Image (cartoon, rainbow, N blue to C red):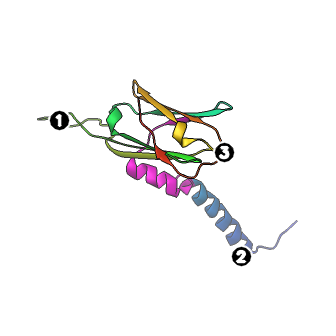
Amino acid sequence: MIRRWRPLNELSRRERKMDSLLNELWRGFSPRGLAEAQFGSFPVDVLDQGDEIIVRAELPGVEKDKIDLRCTEDSISIATEKSEQRQVKGGTWVVQESSFGKMVRTINLEAPVDPDNAQASFENGVLTITLPKTGPSKRGCSIQIT
C-alpha cells in the first residue's frame, strides 16, 4: 500500500519528539532545584510515626550554633552556613568536592504539627527534629538545639 507523504504530519511528529526530549532534559531544572543548586543542599529524611513527625538532616562539618531552625504548623525550614577552614598553600586542587556556603531546605509537612513543643538534637553531624502532630497553630517559632 502506498501512502501519500504529508510533510506537515512529519513535522508535527518531529516536534512532539523534540518537546518530549527537552521536557526530559529540563525536568531537573525546577525553581526548587535551581534554588538548591544556588544555596547548596543536604539530604533530609521525613518519617511519620503516627503521633509525631521525625525529620533527620545530614549536616557533616556544620557547627550546632550555625543551624537556624524555623517551624510553622505545616513546614520546617533548616538553614545553615558551612565555612571553609582549611587553607592550601603551594598546591593545586586535583579534586575538590567539599561544599561551603549557605544551605537552606524547607520541608512541607503532610500533617499539622505543634511548633511550640518541637524538639531538636544534633549529634555526629545528624540533626534530628521531633515534631508532635496537633491541630493548626496560629504562629511559628524558633527551635533550640540541645
What kind of element bears circle 1?
A: loop
**What residue lies at 76% left-to-right and 73% top-to-bottom?**
5
Classify residue 143 as left or right of residue 62: right
Label 1 to label 2: alpha-carbon separation: 62 Å
Q: Quadrant of the C terminus?
A: top left
Question: How many circles with numbers are drawn on the protein?
Answer: 3
The x, y position of residue 101, in whole percent, is 32, 45
Tell me the quarter of the picture where residue 12 sits: bottom right
Per the rendering, the mark at residue 135 is 3
Residue type, numbered disc 1: Gln
Q: Quadrant of the N terminus?
A: bottom right
Comes first in the chain, label 3 or label 1: 1
- Closer mark to the observer between disc 1 and disc 2: 1
- Residue 57 visible within the image: yes
Residue under the image location 81 percent in, 73 percent down: 4
What's the CA distance linking mark 2 and mark 3?
Answer: 58 Å
Q: Sequence-wise, which precedes: disc 1 or disc 2?
A: 2
Residue picked out by circle 1: 87
The crowd level at tag 1 (other Cα within 10 Å; few <14, some 14-19, many 20+) is: few
- Amino acid carrying label 2: it is Leu
Q: Nearer the viewer, residue 113 or 21?
A: 113
Looking at the rendered structure, which numbered label has been put on residue 8? Answer: 2
The residue lying toward the viewer, choosing from 71 and 89, is 71
The reply to whether the magenta stretch includes residue 89 is no
Q: Which residue is at a point 65% across and 67% down the rendered structure image?
A: 15
Cα separation, mark 3 vs mark 1, equals: 50 Å
